[in-house]
Amino acid sequence: MLKDGSLRIDGFRESNLTPNGYDVTIEEIWVPSTDLRKKDGVVNVPARSWFVIGTKEYLVLPETIVGEIWIRTTWVRKGILSSFGRIDAGFNGNLTFSAYNASGDGVEVRIGDRFAQVVFEELRTPPAKAYKERSGNYQGQRGITLQPKRDQTN
């Protein structure tokens, strides 16, 4: 997929390839309870706090490939919970992850750390409607994006 150019990962690092997929890294973190937003260094996410991560990688999926997202177990073992799904075929953009520190302690999150693994799967047939035609709410998103394009006012 990567070799033939059908799948593109801007910000790609060979060291992030895994036997099953690709580990995406943290470029930005926002902790709403403290209104802290950082793009460098380390963030201490307070106990029992919600936080949001934006990935360094910008993914360009063709209409025949989907991505399934899994949190890395390193974070689960620290008490970080997150729920993911699939990246639609035809999606282009950075990824935004919502996560929660369920532990009783603060957890250090370093910009550049690997946070989740994306497992890419080839579809047998292309979807009836491509992502950009079906909704495209987050198509082309850059950085942390919480609102669909249709709801953004700027």
Image: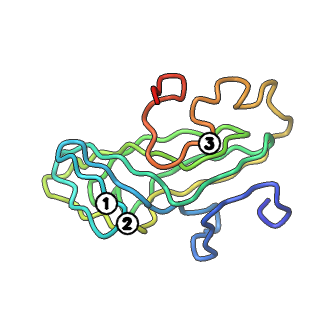
Q: Is residue 115 left or right of residue 132?
A: left
User: Mark 3 and mark 1 in contact (Cβ < 8 Å)?
Assistant: no
Colour approach in the figure = rainbow
- Image quarter for residue 50? top left
Residue in the picture at 41% in, 60% down: 73
Marks 2 and 1, how far apart in space?
19 Å
Which quadrant is home to the N terminus?
Answer: bottom right
Dot 2 and dot 1 residues touching (CB under 8 Å): no
> x, y percentage for residue 154?
46, 30
Please identify, in this view, whether the residue under mark 2 or under mark 1 is nearer the observer: 2
* Residue 90 rendering spot, x and y as whole percentages: 73, 40
Residue at 78% x, 47% y is 122
Q: Residues within 10 Å of mark 2 (few under 14, many from 20)?
A: many
How dense is the environment of label 1, judged by Cα within 10 Å: few (below 14), some, or many (20 and up)?
few
Residues tagged 2 and 3 counted as in contact (Cβ below 8 A): no
Mark 1 element type:
loop
Mark with earlier residue (2, 3): 2
Judged by depth in the image, the label closer to the viewer, 2 or 3, is 3
Element under label 2? loop
Q: Earlier in the sequence, mark 1 or mark 3?
A: 1
Q: Amino acid at mark 1?
A: Arg
The dot on residue 77 is 1
In the drawing, what numbered circle is on residue 111? Answer: 2
